[in-house]
Amino acid sequence: MSSSEQLYDLAIVGGGLAGLTLSIQMRKKGYRVIVFEKESYPMHRVCGEYISMESAQYLYDCGVDRNALKLPRITQLHVTAPSGYKLAHALSPGGFGISRYKLDDMLATYATNLGVVVLQQTPVTHLEKNATTYTVNTRTSSYTVRMVAGTWGKRSTMDVKWNRAFVQERNRLLSRYIGIKYHVQADLPHNLIELHNFKDGYCGISKIEDDRYCMCYLTTAENLKLAGGDIKRMEEQILHKNPYLKTYFNQYTSMYEKPLAISQISFERKETDMHAVPFAGDSAGLITPLCGNGMSMALHASKLLSHHLDKFLQQDAIDVQACLASYKQQWEVHFSGRMRAGRLIQSMFGSTLMTEALLRILKPFPLFVGKLVDSTHGDTF
């Protein structure tokens, strides 16, 4: 195995939203940064592709100008029960839509232009903390770095190797989900995000860039098993019972030959660090998708982590344990409440009768609906 001669200040394992924006912020501070991404850009990811407005300025600082891109501004929310009963609510300040295919590629290009070393198709096989540095191994090379950040997403081989708690909890209620995503051509308002419930799941649809919409749903592995592992059969047997989803799946043309799928999604509480490696984004905690705030949380966490890593990398400013402790404290302040709210709201949906009753109770009280939305979002950062 060859060895890298250059000593990097920071290695980032995972080139998604948290990893790429962290690399950009740290490079702007003057550090030598390397990113390891197991796939290659541009790529599709299973994601709702809606970003709340709290992230707009931060993304602009990272080279993404939503106004110049003419991205759709989303200001309205429709939620339906499996029967089709609908609740409509104005979103303030709302958000905007952009595909991960476009966004991640833009961030990777911007990071590279700044001088970040972005290694694609390079999975990390081993991480190790040494006395004063870290060792990062790939299949072909070994790198010595001053600090490592884990931003590898919902679930990775590193999670399994480190036997993280959420990996062990396959039978827990919050660890049994699968996600399916399409890009479709549709005829819907550009300013609208819809959330359609069905038995043990929900499907979101909203406008992204160009002439396409993201249609992404979350359901249980049990639903897929009941359909014999056939996604189309599951959609026909379960999702189509919601009249909106039946119409959408029958009328709108998918732009994929087959849908993107991801399994073993966990909403269990996760650690913010392990083996002296801090986590950001979904590797630190995944908010339930119906909250529509996962992308913004990943972006915000990367900004928080950049401040703490900067203090650590300034010679003798703080040690590793102080860096991890201060980051964890800030992460809890900003996100733990949202995560709890997300898990509570998710527990209210999924049951056909409960979802119907909840929407009927909420509909006359828009102020309370607004407070529920606000409980899963934060301020501009």
Image: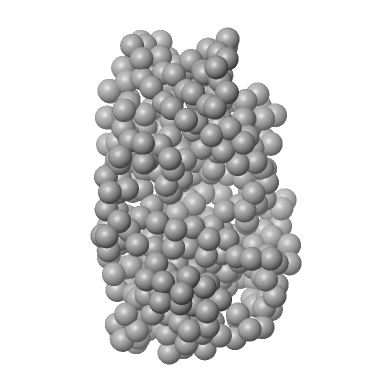
Front in this rendered view, residue 325 or 246: 246
Q: Residue at x 32, y 58 (%)?
A: 175
Q: Residue at x 53, y 44 (%)?
A: 17
Confirm whether residue 374 shows in the render.
no
Q: Position of residue 123 (x, y in %)?
A: 53, 34
Q: Residue at x 64, y 62 (%)?
A: 208
Confirm whether residue 104 shows in the render.
yes
- Indicate whether 154 appears above or below 241: above
The answer to which image quadrant residue 308 occupies is: top left
Q: Quadrant of the N terminus?
A: top right
Q: Position of residue 215 (x, y in %)?
A: 57, 69
For the image shown, how many numbered marks are present on the structure?
Answer: 0
Front in this rendered view, residue 168 or 6: 168
Q: Position of residue 212 (x, y in %)?
A: 69, 67
Give the side of residue 338 with respect to residue 259, left or right.
left
- Indicate whether 103 appears above or below 5: below
Q: Given the current orientation, which residue lies at the most extreme front position?
A: 228
- Indicate whether 337 appears above or below 211: above
Front in this rendered view, residue 197 or 312: 197
Q: Position of residue 216 (x, y in %)?
A: 53, 66
The answer to which image quadrant residue 107 occupies is: top right
Give the side of residue 320 with respect to residue 180, left or right.
left
Give the side of residue 19 with respect to residue 177, left or right.
right
- Indicate whether 271 appears above or below 201: above
Q: Residue at x 58, y 44 (%)?
A: 59
Give the side of residue 149 with respect to residue 245, left or right.
left
| Colour setting | one colour
